[in-house]
Amino acid sequence: MAAFIASLVVTFAMVGILLAVARRRPVGQPLSWGEAFVAATFVFALLFVAYGVVPHHFLALADNQFKWRDDKIGIPIGGLAIGPLRRIIKPPYLLFPKGVPLTNGHFIITAQVLRDVIAGGIYAVLVGAQLYGWAWWQRRGKAPATTDVERSAYGRPLLRPAEEAT
């Protein structure tokens, strides 16, 4: 658990450093070769931690401490069984411990499948954040397009110049 949390903290700290530097850097300022080398190394390290270390530590956490194996049928809910739900949900604290009931049988969901879905979700969030970051970087310093159009006394835009309108 500590390794997974530490990898998340390192990732968020690196993203914070990246955002702080990006906001201070003037748009269009050329890079020296040293700045480019340091920036490329930093971004490589960030992507390595985000796409490699964080999912690895989650999978290790799910396998070793949570014991989400392929022989555990059902969706583990862990701490959700504490409090008023304790009367409803009994040990082994799983949702659908015999599978999701269907008309022709049961749809079996194992804890390992849930582990893999969460790991895929981690990758999906990271890809979305990376695409948003690229778009944000490209839009940096650009003023929004203004569409100041002359309006008539009634508030509607004029379609022709004022000197031609008679």
Image (cartoon, helix red, strand yellow):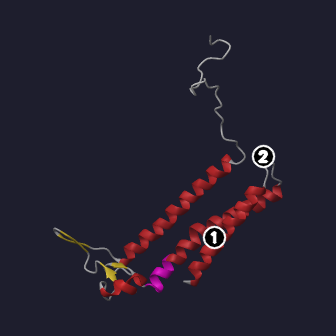
- Residue type at mark 2 is Gly
Q: Secondary structure at mark 1?
A: helix
> Residue at 42% of width from left, 71% of height from top?
116
Please tell me in which quadrant of the rendered image residue 5 appears: bottom right
Q: Residue furthest bottom?
A: 91
The quadrant of the rendering that contains the N terminus is bottom right
Q: Report the Cα–Cα distance between label 2 and label 1.
A: 27 Å
Residue placed most toward the observer, 95 or 149: 149
Residue 72 shows up from this direction: no
Q: Which residue is mark 1?
A: 11
| Residue at 43% over, 84% down | 79
Query: Percent x, y for residue 57?
Result: 54, 77
Front residue of this view, candidates 128 and 33: 128
Q: Is residue 52 left or right of residue 32?
A: left
Image height of 160 relative to 28, above or below:
above
- Compared with 145, 131 (above or below) is below
Mark 1: few/some/many CA within 10 Å (<14, 14-19, 20+): many
Instruction: Decide which of tag 2 and tag 1 comes sooner along the chain.
Output: 1
Instruction: Estimate the x, y position of residue 103 in percent, counting from the top left.
Output: 16, 68
Instruction: Note whether 78 is above or below 143 in the view shown.
Output: below
Main secondary structure found in the magenta portion: helix
Q: Position of residue 63 (x, y in %)?
A: 45, 82
Whether residue 9 is visible: yes
Viewer-nearest residue: 61 or 44: 61
User: At 77% from the left edge and 62% from the top edge, which residue is drawn?
Assistant: 38
Numbered range of the magenta stretch: 59-66
